[in-house]
Amino acid sequence: MTHRTHPTQQDEALRQARQDEAIRDGLRAIADKLAHRKPGHLMTTSQRLACALTASDDIHPNDAVAAEELERQLLRRMPFVDGNVVTRGEYALWLRKTSWGA
């Protein structure tokens, strides 16, 4: 009996498609939250980190490993705000644009 240690191409493609959907959903959920709650306030680095953590926990409430991976993937795609003066509403627009490419 052989044991698979590596996923087949189909398994890997399905895993990536599911992950991409979760990333898009996470980015859009963060954008909605920022656009509807204090959109005129400045976006900060700490808010960027907190939004990614909250969204990943909301999408994967019972799977810490999946939530951590989603948080990493969200942060990879969320633009940095260091040195930029951007409101939460403007940042929400950036995230919506980014979500279409995820």
Image (spheres, rainbow, N blue to C red):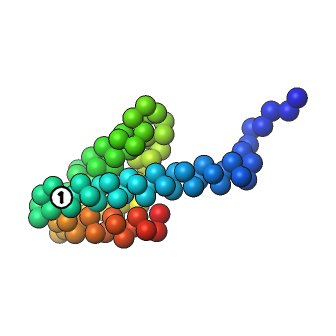
> Where does the image place residue 30, in percent across and percent down from the top left?
30, 55
Looking at the rendering, which quadrant does residue 6 occupy?
top right
> Where does the image place residue 37, in percent across and percent down from the top left?
15, 55
Is 18 on the left-hand or right-hand side of 73? right
Q: Is residue 29 above or below residue 86?
A: above
Comparing 100 with 42, the one in front is: 100
The residue that mark 1 highlights is: 36
The furthest residue to the top: 1
> Where does the image place residue 68, in percent across and percent down from the top left?
43, 41
Residue at position x 63%, y 51% in the image: 14
Looking at the rendering, which quadrant does residue 81 occupy?
bottom left
Comparing 46 with 95, the one in front is: 95
Comparing 56 with 76, the one in front is: 56
Residue at position x 69%, y 48% in the image: 11
> Could you tell me the amino acid type at mark 1?
His
> Where does the image place residue 64, in percent across and percent down from the top left?
44, 33
> Label 1's element?
helix
Total tally of numbered discs in the picture = 1
Q: Is residue 67 above or below residue 51?
A: above
Is 54 on the left-hand or right-hand side of 42? right
Residue at position x 27%, y 46% in the image: 50
Query: Can the viewer see residue 61?
Result: yes
The furthest residue to the right: 1
Local crowd at mark 1 within 10 Å, few (<14), some, or many (≥20)? few
